[in-house]
Amino acid sequence: MSGKYDLVIVGGGISGASLLYTTAKFTDIDSIALIEKESEVAAINSHHTNNSQTLHFGDIETNYTLEKAEEVKEGAELLAGYLENYDPDREMHDKRSKMVLGVGEDEVAELEERYHDEGFGDLFPKLRPIDREEIGEIEPKVVEGRDPSTEMLALQTPDGYVVDYGQTTKSFVEEAEEEANVDVFTGTEVTDITPTLDGYTIETDAGRFDCDATVVAAGSHSLQMAKELGYGQDKVLLPIAGSFFLADDLLNGKVYTLQMKKLPFAAVHGDADVHDDSITRFGPTAKLVPALERGRISTVKDFLDVFGLNAAAFLSYANILSDRVLLPYVLQNLVYDLPNVGRKQFLPHVQKVVPSVELEDIERAKGYGGVRPQIVDTKNKSLDMGEAKIVGDDVIFNITPSPGASTCLKNAMRDTHTLLDFLEGDYEFDEEAFREETIDNFPRGDDSAGKKVAAPGADD
């Protein structure tokens, strides 16, 4: 197997697949290849059991600033529009109510300020504050058994998209493969990437590929490949493994709790599984692991390659983990994996969402959860919140921490413009057609309609 291409994309998760779709369908690039090491695309973090199945808009994520929410919102609407356009039978997604829940005087005040004073009510017209009675109409179990004297408030919206990112990835690839200029190679592992005078040579275990430009969208492995080419030397990874607990049929939609401001990890939340709404998932937990893929011992070596075993990396880890908020959080999350003890320790988080839950109602989910790489800046010895991207000479490395899946099409749109610059203006991107196929299909509704209560599971 070998070939010469204008563009080669390394990685068949949702990041690489969304770029393949965007460049194949909406540019006139002559030849494009996608290379994936697994036997099928979306086999690792994009698989629906390995992520929170959430389409993040920034409306109920309380660790987002208004500026970050504005950035994320467009990306989420692009993907939501794609799903509305290409998935009318809801095989890749479902749409349900979602809310962020404030319990107690302090949390209620925080949500009121966020909605009225910080501008989130204006940015998200469908988002609205609801009281205990309305919360109970939409999510009865959230109110049932809770002390009636406890203050409650939720910010609720009908735009609770739950997404099977694995099926969405496959959809992107299927759409791209309709074009004659696209080749997809699975079961093909990259062993080396070498710069050439005309671009890059990509060696794999199945042959050699030459290309004018390349994008590495291989999750945690992207930084590993970047470092091998001399990029990203001031970055290391803090790999976080997420896990979930399961219960039977407790929630109709997604219920978030308030996020701790200093943490990049998702707040504990409960939601109905995308394919089986009789299963309620609670999580994710967030455990430090010295590996780039969940359950694969072979990727421990890959982590050490990225870590570098140098003073800057050790000092950065020490500075981050000594934080008075982060350190207790990390230690607490280690406990959740312990048999019996972990379930008991996690139960209060579940009961904050559904007070009537008892220990025997929840169980650790087997086979759920993936690894999310958090980026560490060794110059500033700090966590780098947000998506991570390194742009080099005719090469882009996407490491894409959260909310990478939610903003995959926006990221693909940006990368497409960059790629056309790499290719020196030989090709064009029809962004108008791209938007017609994606964001133009997002159902906005008018402001007044958005302020009405949506029944559980109802569309707006």
Image (tube, rainbow, N blue to C red):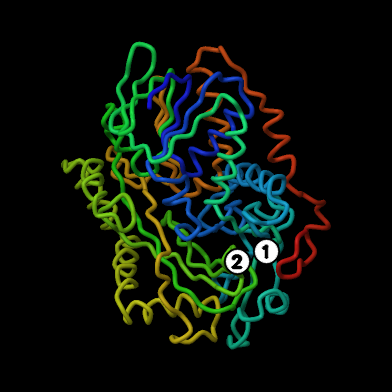
Q: Is residue 180 above or below residue 224?
A: above
The residue shown at (66%, 48%) is 83
Q: Is residue 331 above or below residue 291?
A: below
- Picture coordinates of residue 226, whole percent (x, y): 32, 32
Please state, as top left, top right, bottom left or bottom right, where the N terminus lies in the image.
top left
**Which kind of residue does numbered mark 1 sit on?**
Arg
Which residue lies under the disc numbered 1? 96
SS at mark 2 in the image = strand
Of residues 41 and 230, the one nearer the viewer is 41
Please state, as top left, top right, bottom left or bottom right, where the C terminus lies in the image.
bottom right
Residue 161 position by quadrant: bottom right
Count neighbours of disc 1 (C-alpha within 10 A) and say few if under 14, some if 14 to 19, many if 20 or more: many
SS at mark 1 in the image = strand
The residue shown at (68%, 65%) is 97
Q: Is residue 311 above or below residue 286?
A: above
Which residue lies under the disc numbered 2? 254
Label 2 – label 1 distance at C-alpha: 7 Å
- Picture coordinates of residue 132, whole percent (x, y): 68, 78
Relative to 183, 121 lies left or right: right
**Is residue 232 visible to the viewer in this orientation of the structure?**
no
The residue shown at (48%, 54%) is 47
**Which kind of residue does numbered mark 2 sit on?**
Lys
- Picture coordinates of residue 455, whole percent (x, y): 75, 70
The residue shown at (63%, 29%) is 25
Of residues 165 and 401, the one nearer the viewer is 165
Q: Which mark is residue 244?
A: none
- The answer to whether mark 2 and mark 1 are in CB contact below 8 A is yes
Relative to 97, 415 lies left or right: left
Count neighbours of disc 2 (C-alpha within 10 A) and say few if under 14, some if 14 to 19, many if 20 or more: many
N-term-proximal mark, 2 vs 1: 1
Residue 356 position by quadrant: bottom right
How many numbered badges does the structure rendering display?
A: 2
